[in-house]
Image: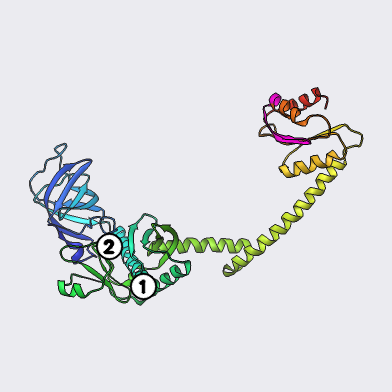
Amino acid sequence: MTRRLYYEDAYLKEFMAQVEECRPTDGGYLIFLDATAFYPEGGGQPCDLGTLETVSGEEGGAPETKDGKISQAVRVLDVQETDGRVAHFTDGPLLQKTAVRGRIDWQRRLTHMREHSGEHILSGIICKTYGYSNIGFHMGREFVTVDFSGLLTQEQIGAAQRLANEKVLEDVEIKAEYPGAESLSQLEYRSKKEISGPVRIVTIPGADCCACCGTHVKRTGEIGPIRVIGSEHYKNGIRLNVLIGEKALADYAQKSESAAKISALLSAKPDQTAEAVEKLLEAMNALKMEYGALRFRLLEEKADSVPKGQKSCVLFEQGLSVTDARRLADRLQEKVEFSAVFCGSDEEGYRYVILSRKGDIAAFGRAFNEALGGRGGGKAPMIQGSVTALRREIEAYLEKMGI
Ligand SMILES: [Zn+2]
């Protein structure tokens, strides 16, 4: 059994210990100490990282090594619990039966402690208020995910978030204890699984009481802001994406900057940007309508400018929608027997609408597509489709057909 120094003092950043065992493993070494402040991955909390360093002048037992070399200092790359012992996975071997100084990556651990305590508050409040259990918990690189057994509305999430932040501001003490069997049986606490042996209970007065093996901050005030930034359905319940502590602060700073930029762009006060965007959308829709009407008039004028008495009219246009092309071809039909509108360019190809008051337009379409690598069809009096041929090839084909 390894002595768990992180349970005696969760704020221990450096510690001394004895190397009990060091052995090679895939990609590195496994080092076991008599005591450690390195938290092994468990209970939703990732492991600690850091270094182990031989205290100078120590002579101990050489372990089995891959190249005969012993390191003075090694990096701890992973920490796992195995058979009641804490295994430190390192990038090098250390002498056995010697003293080492361990240093944990404190910023990483503190972030985990804030996130873990923040998660307990939120889960405790949701359990108490809505009766849903926490069925999953993961501290990701970007945010914490917490899964609950039932669905929550946005209002309920907002209310739980507000209560959680109030508990942070109250700055109450967070306690971790091992109650005796009798007091444990009287205690109402959250637990994800059946636990054998002594149960470690983490209590946050007024918010939560939960069986937990993780590390926590001393007081809720240290947690910092708790912000739910997203939610999704998950296994008949809900998954919340949560930012806690420094990540919530960084998010606030980034969003404030973005809000200030939007506010400057809209020339609106930061708390009135939504109304300003609504007005902007209204103005844009009005412009769209006006643009549509103008465009229609332009098409009409274009069609009207075609001299009377022509048998056919073929136009190449850019930036026309298929609807506009149809409108234009329709309008041309009032004057000519055969009208065709091609929209596009030689590079991207052409979409076409062709109308004819005479002849078999469907048969014409088939021959047209075959000759020019096109696709599409229709029936009298209109065909439409697309071709990949160049403009001069299309024009040459139509000329050959006497159009
Ligand atoms: Zn926990």
Q: Main secondary structure of the magenta part?
A: strand
On the image, the x and y values in percent for residue 391 come to 74, 29
Q: Earlier in the sequence, mark 1 or mark 2?
A: 1
Q: Is residue 377 magenta?
A: yes
Label 1 close to label 2 by CB (< 8 Å): no
Q: Depth check: 110 or 283 in front? A: 283
Q: Which residues are magenta?
A: 370-386
On the image, the x and y values in percent for residue 46 come to 29, 56
Residue 96 in sight here? yes
For the residues labelled 1 and 2, the Cα–Cα distance comes to 24 Å
Q: Nearer the viewer, mark 1 or mark 2?
A: 2
> Which amino acid lies under the numbered mark 1 shown in the image of this protein?
Val
On the image, the x and y values in percent for residue 111 come to 33, 61
Q: Residues within 10 Å of mark 2 (few under 14, many from 20)?
A: few
Q: For mark 2, give the secondary structure.
A: loop
Residue 353 in sight here? no
> Which amino acid lies under the numbered mark 2 shown in the image of this protein?
Lys
Q: Depth check: 119 or 156 in front? A: 156
**Colouring used for the render:** rainbow
Q: For mark 1, give the secondary structure.
A: helix
State the quadrant of the C terminus: top right
Residue at 80% x, 39% y: name it.
Answer: 329
Q: Is mark 1 within 8 Å of ligand 1?
A: no
Residue pointed to by mark 1: 168
Q: Is residue 310 magenta?
A: no
Residue at 26% x, 73% y: name it.
Answer: 188
On the image, the x and y values in percent for residue 61 come to 7, 46
Q: Which mark is residue 192?
A: 2
